[in-house]
Amino acid sequence: MICARQRCLLSILLLMSSLVICAGALAAPITWSTTGSLNTARTNHTATLLPSGQVLVAGGQGGAPSYVAIGSVEIYDPGAAAWSVVASLNTARQSHTATLLPSGLVLVVGGQDANGSVLNTAELYDPTTNSWSFTLNNLHSPRVGHTATLLPSGLVLVVGGQDANNVLNTAELYDPATNMWTPSTGALNTARESHIATLLPSGLVLVAGDTGSGTSGVVSSAELYDPDLDSWTTYLPGNLNTARAGPTATLLTSGQVLIAGGSNNHGVFPANTELYNPNPISLGGSWTATTNTLATARTQHTATLLPSGQVLVTGGGQGFFTVFASTEVYDPGTNSWSSSPAANLATARYGHTATLLASGQVLVVGGTGSGGTVLASAELYDSGNQWNAAGALATARWGYSATLLPSGKVLVAGGESNSGVLASTEIYDPTTSLWSPAGNLNTARYYHTATLLPSGQVLVAGGYASNGTSSGTAELYGVPRIQWTLLHRDLWAASTILTGSPVPSDIRSTWALPITAGPWSAVSTTP
């Protein structure tokens, strides 16, 4: 038998050992691990982060051989690191919207069914009962290509889209209290789909641009929805000064919205930029041109709101062979753009990512250069309006995901290079300005989703695989969390790890909870 003094000394030694082991585990390389495959391959689905930390993946377009809308739904549980099939949608659908309501329910709206028909139905998912139910009434118009905006009141505003034949000028409101849809008062002045809908700090919703009905093509109009009056303005904010598709829309700290770049119906790239001012609200706000224009008209650029309140526009182009290295900065204080050759990117690019780091710097990565060359270079912008090299990716890529981790590092995953679809992943460390490999995805993919979970892990799901079909797999990246329970349990488990022998039964029996000898998993849980 071990005396009390010996047991005390042993406990101290084991405590020190367990701390060393845990420190080593936390310092171990972060790796990719499979989450198990989605049970059904899909694209054009929705992925909704639930209050529980789980991820709900609903509907979408299935894979070979039919490539039609599917009704299957799955949940990823980061606690179990596994996918599970849950109740199916009542109607198979793709290209729908999914909105998380304050109650924790998920509202899925519209889209297209397996026959390609546009849907007028909406469904609610209740995670507590694992069930889908239709709303009490249907949408007043079937629609796809619409927007769905959660209002401060808890209502959901669905705007525009198209039905089987026409682009729509209608909007509808869903009220969770009654579980019913009602049409918005009046109609949009311009039918539109694939447009921009921005919830302003005032609670108003600004809808602007993109595709209109008939032969109108890209539209310049913008409209404002007032939830208090349930009405659309017919006089202000008026039209954008220039019709454009594919612009960037940046919500400024003032509550204004900056519209920049894009292209119009005639293949023209407008250099002028526009500012929506929501005040005075009683007049619906107004559109004004910025004091000057972009020095270089562009599309497929990035626009990043800086901590200073300024907006940094980088790269972009005017087609496959006209790609820009220039960058420009919008200053809301002077309502003007500035540019300098000294502030140009070292490499012209479009289709890249721009990630705002905790330091206020902006990391620009990869993308495509002139003639379709996929890029490996990365560059870092600082507040001095200067660019510096940020090392190079080991593999050139576009169509990847870039995720800012809680550590301040940036995780780049998958994508496509000139030689094919990628499984490789890389991490950028801003403290060293170096890239390092982060292991390979188990499935090469591009145009996937990447969701930062509350645990700090990253869930990568779906996308397109090497053969061009939609992928049904998903993977998890991150460090397992150490779960400390009762201290004495962890100490004896640590003893087992160190010695490789079971804890003696006479010692183990003195504790209320028995310890099972085993590997490191005995003192850790899958996040």
Image: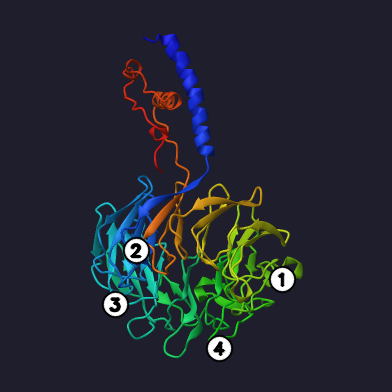
Tell me the kind of residue under disc 1: Ser
Q: Secondary structure at mark 4?
A: loop
Residue 115 at x, y percent in the picture: 27, 77
Compare marks 2 and 1 and give the one earlier in the sequence.
2
Residue 506 at x, y percent in the picture: 33, 15
Compare marks 4 and 2 and give the one earlier in the sequence.
2
Locate residue 186: give its quadrant.
bottom left
Residue at mark 1:
338
Q: Secondary structure at mark 2?
A: loop
Tell me the kind of residue under disc 2: Ala
Compare marks 3 and 1 and give the one earlier in the sequence.
3
Compare marks 1 and 4 and give the one earlier in the sequence.
4
Q: Residues within 10 Å of mark 4 (few under 14, many from 20)?
A: few
Q: Give the image's coloring scheme.
A: rainbow
Quadrant holding the N terminus:
top left
Which residue occupies 40% across, 8% down? 3
Residue at mark 3:
140
Image-based side of 104 in relation to 323, left or right: left
Residue at mark 2:
41
The residue lying furthest to the bottom in this view is: 215
Q: Residues within 10 Å of mark 1 (few under 14, many from 20)?
A: few
Q: Secondary structure at mark 3?
A: loop
Compare marks 3 and 2 and give the one earlier in the sequence.
2
Q: CA distance from mark 4 to mark 2?
A: 38 Å
Q: Residues within 10 Å of mark 3 (few under 14, many from 20)?
A: some
Residue at mark 4:
266
Locate residue 486: give its quadrant.
top left
Tell me the kind of residue under disc 4: His
Q: CA distance from mark 1 to mark 4?
A: 27 Å
Residue 183 at x, y percent in the picture: 32, 76
